[in-house]
Amino acid sequence: MQEAIIQIEGLKKSFGTKEVLKNINLTVNKGENLVILGKSGEGKSVTIKCIVGLLKPDGGSLKVFGEEVTEMNEDQLKELRTRTGFLFQSGALYDSMTVRQNLSFPLTRVLKLKDQKEIDDRINEILDSVGLLDAIDKVPSDLSGGMRKRIGLARTLIVKPEIILYDEPTTGLDPITSREISRLILDMQKKYQTTSIIITHDIACAQITGDRIVIMSQGEYVAEGKYEELEKSNDKLVNSFFK
Amino acid sequence: MLKDLFTKHASSFEKLGEQVYFFKSFSRNTFHKGFEWEEFIHQCYVIGYRSLGIVAVTGFVLGFVLTLQSMPTLKDFGAETYVPSMVSISVIREIGPVITALICAGKIASSIGAELGSMNVSEQIDAMEVSGANPMQYLVVTRILACTLMIPLLTIFADFMAFFGGYFGNNLSSDMSAVLYFSKSINSIYFEDLIPALVKTVFFGFTIGFVGCYKGYTSNKGTESVGLAANSAVVNASVWIIIIDAVAVQATNAFVYN
C-alpha cells in the first residue's frame, strides 16, 4: 500500500461571502506528481497555500506527513515548511539579491549551514541541474521569465524538500519554454524523489508532469484520473480542457 | 446602538488589533535567537549614510534661515549677540529633531513602505515565510532597529550643520568671530536641553521604522497598494512624530524644567 503524504478531507475556505473551496477531498501519495487542473480563480492556489499554512482553512482536515496542519503552532509550521518547497507563479526571487544570494538564503537561514565551501558546492550543483550556472552573479531583473522560474525552482530544491508545491509553473511563458520547464520539473522529481502538487491550467504541462490529474471547478473536484483517461472523458467540462 | 457603533468602526478596531499584533511579533522576534546582524548593518548604511546629504542641506539651511529671520528683531532690541544662543537652543531642543524626523519620514518611511509593499505584491515575503526563514526578523526587526539607531545620529549631524548655517547667516550682517559664535552657541546648551531632545528622536526613529514596515508588510496584493503603502507610511509617520513631539515637550516641561 502506498504511503499518503498529504491527506485533505472536506476542506473549506471562504473570502468574505465568496466560497472558494467548498468540499475538497484529496490524497497525494509518496513520490507522486499530482496535477490540479482548473480555470483561473477556481481556488487551486488557495488549496496549496492552505497546505503550507499561508492561509487558514475555515473547515475540514488537512494532514501533511500525518500531522494536522490546522492545529500546528508557529514552530511546527516552520518545521513543516523546511520539508516542503513552494514554487510561486512569479518565481518570487528576492530582487535585492543576486542569484547566488537568493540560493544561499535558505541554506544559511533554514538549514543553518556555516561552511562556505559546502554552500558554494550546493549552489553550483543546483544551478548546474537547472542549466543556469552562468547566471550565478546576476540579479533577478537581468533574468528572463523562464530563467526566473528555473532559479525559483533551484531555490526551492536546494534545501532538498520532500514535497514541492508548484503554483502555475508555466504561466506567462512561451510554449517552448513552458515545455522545458515542465520537463525540468519531471527531471527534478526523478532526481530528488519528491512528492509534488502542480497547479496549472496548461494542458501540455499537465500531460508532461502529471502521474494523476484532478480537475477543479467552482471550489470542488469534478474529475480525477490519468491524462489518457480524462482525455477520453465524455464530460463536457473535462472535455473542454483537452480541446 | 453600541452594536451599530461597533459595526461602523469594526475595521478601525481590526486595524488597531493588527498593529498590536505586529508590534507583539516585532518584540518577540527582536529577542529571538539568530539576529540578522549583516542585514541590520546594511540597513544602518542605507538609512543613515544615504540620508546624510539631505539631512546636511536641511540642517544648514535651517540654521541659516533661523538666524536671518531672528537677526532684525533682536537687532531692534540691541540683542543681536543673543542670536547664537537663540539659534542653538531652538535647534537642539525642537527644530533639529522635528525637522530631521519629518524629512526622514518622507525619505525613509516611504522607501521602506514601498520596498516591503512591492515584496508583498511579488510574493517575496510569502516565499521567505514558506521557505521556513523568518521574514519578520530579516525584514522588519532590522529596519525598525536601524531607524531607531540612525535617526538620533542623523539629528545630531543636522544640529551641527544648523550651527554652521547659523554662523554663515550671522556672518552676513555681523562681524562676530567663528570662535565667539560657536562658544556662545555651545555654552548656552545644557544637558537638560540635549538629553530629552535625543530621547525623543529615539521614539521618532522607532515610529518611522515601525510605520514604514507595518504599512509595507500588511499592504494588499496589488500594484496600487505599493503607492498607497508608501503614501500612508509618510502621512502616518509624520502625524505620529508631531503627536510624540507634543507629548515629549509636555513631559520635558513637567519632569526636567520644573
Image (tube, rainbow, N blue to C red):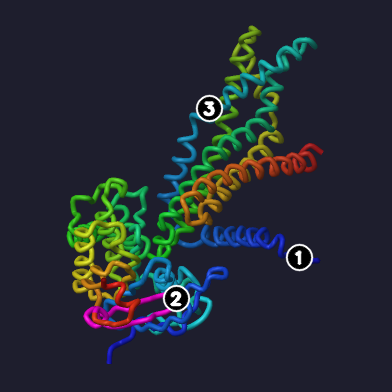
The reply to whether residue A78 is visible in this rendering is no
- Are the residues at dot 1 and dot 3 in contact (C-beta closer than 8 Å)? no
Query: What amino acid is labelled 1 in the image?
Result: Asp
Sequence-wise first label, 1 or 3: 1
| Spot occupied by residue A163 in the image (x, y as percentages of width and height) | 32, 74
- Residue at 62% over, 24% down: B62
Q: Position of residue B121 (x, y in %)?
A: 44, 54
Q: Nearer the viewer, residue A13 or B149?
A: A13
| Residue A36 percent across, percent down from the top left | 33, 74
Left or right for A216, reference B253: left
Quadrant assignment for the N terminus of chain A: bottom left
Q: Residue at x 53, y 69 (%)?
A: A15
Tag shown at residue A219: 2
**In front of the other: A32 or B172:** A32
Label placed on residue B56: 3
Image mark for residue B4 = 1
Residue under the point 19% across and 74% down: A190
Which chain is indicated by disc 2? Answer: A
* Dot 3: element: helix
Q: Residue at (66%, 43%) from the top-left corner? A: B239
Residue numbers of the magenta segment: A212-231
Q: Residue furthest bottom?
A: A1
Q: Is residue A196 left or right of residue B22?
A: left
Our reading of the magenta stretch's main secondary structure is strand
Q: Where residue A155 sits in the image (x, y, percent)? A: 30, 61
